Amino acid sequence: MIDEKLERRQLAPNLTAFGITQLRRLGAMRASGLIWVLVIMCAVAAFVSDAFLNPFNLINVLRQVALFGIVSVGMTFVILTAGIDLSIGSIVAVVAVTAAMLLDASLPIPLVIVAGLAIGSVMGAVNGAGITLGGIPPFIMTLGTMVMGRGLAMTISDGHPIHFRAVADQFAWLGQGHLLGLPVPVWVFVIVAALAAGLLRFTAFGRNIYAVGSNPEAARLAGIDVKRTIFLVYLISGFLSGLTALIFISRLTVGEPVAGTGLELEAIAITVIGGTSLFGGEGRISGTILGAAIVAVLANILNLFGVSPFTQQIVKGAIIVAAVLFEIIRRRKNSVSKHG
């Protein structure tokens, strides 16, 4: 008992506000660099293509930022704890087909929205329970739920898209509507990002997330409930995946069992590009917002130039590898400087 108390005193300083402040300063520096990258990309795109600055095209870019950004916020929470969530695309598919079936059965729209968010949350909670209670590594657990979730979506829909034309007009506002000149999904993303940023910056839970990602053993010795923290970040990821699914089907007026395919790649790319470390403990929501904007602008530029979607996947995969390699090199330099 005495040894543990001594160890707690030695490790607890790593979790102080000073340490978190240092991480925030580092995140601010990265964010400023990302802003310049985004500005240069937009300038180049505007120079080489007149279509880029077309208001209709810019609205589409903003909508893409919102759709991918919402689920990427959930991925940011997960990766901050040094975890990974490969199941978000499958969660989107399950919620999409289930919500479409409920809408086709003429259930009240508010009830369908609550049901969709609840299904996403439950699937996220299953991931969290398997990781914290079962001791299953996040990669394996979410890989398993990814496969099971996709199979569940296929089973529910019998492999066919589910249309809900009867209430399509009433439900379309969430994905197709505009408010103050901007698409509704953009406002949803703004609200989600603001709440997430506030949660990470101003609450004990947010500080716990950074602590767990930086050093889970030190966090435990400092009195943090590590398992509860990890469980909740996967629940949040599932909730935001469910929200993304509702926006998807509202825009398309159909729930497809293949919805969300590859979405985990998009979310990981956005989160990593935004400066969140795959090793945990470092990252900001502002970086995720900029990462979503960079990925959306890059995809838009490639689309304007007629680049194949398959080639775009190669580019995004290369970006992820490059970002992780940069993080590894940076950590090695920091380690050498500390011990040098």
Image (cartoon, rainbow, N blue to C red):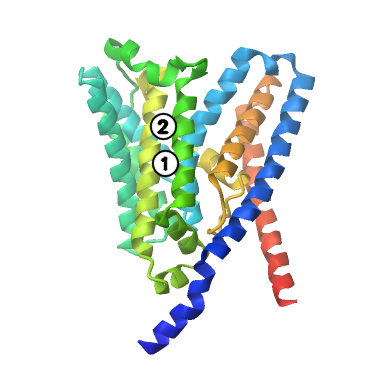
Q: Is residue 264 above or below residue 186?
A: below
Give the residue type that dot 1 points to: Ile
Locate residue 59, reporting x and y percent.
57, 18
> Which of these two is toward me, 49 or 35?
35
* Label 2: element kind: helix
Tell me the quarter of the image containing the C terminus. Answer: bottom right
| Label 1 to label 2: alpha-carbon separation | 10 Å
Q: For mark 1, does the 10 Å Cα neighbourhood hold few (<14), some (14 to 19), or many (20 or more) residues?
A: many
Q: Is residue 127 left or right of residue 21?
A: left
Q: Is residue 183 above or below residue 4?
A: above
Residue in the image at 54% along x and 27% along y: 64
- Residue 266 lies in quadrant: top right
* Label 1: element kind: helix
Tell me the quarter of the image containing the N terminus. Answer: bottom left
Q: Which residue is mark 2?
A: 244
Q: Which residue is mark 1?
A: 88
Mark number, residue 194: none
Give the residue type that dot 2 points to: Thr
- Circles 1 and 2 in contact, beta carbons < 8 Å: yes
Q: Is residue 229 visible?
A: yes
> Which of these two is toward me, 115 or 7?
7
Q: Is residue 158 visible?
A: no
Question: What is the residue that sits farthest to the bottom in this orientation?
Answer: 2
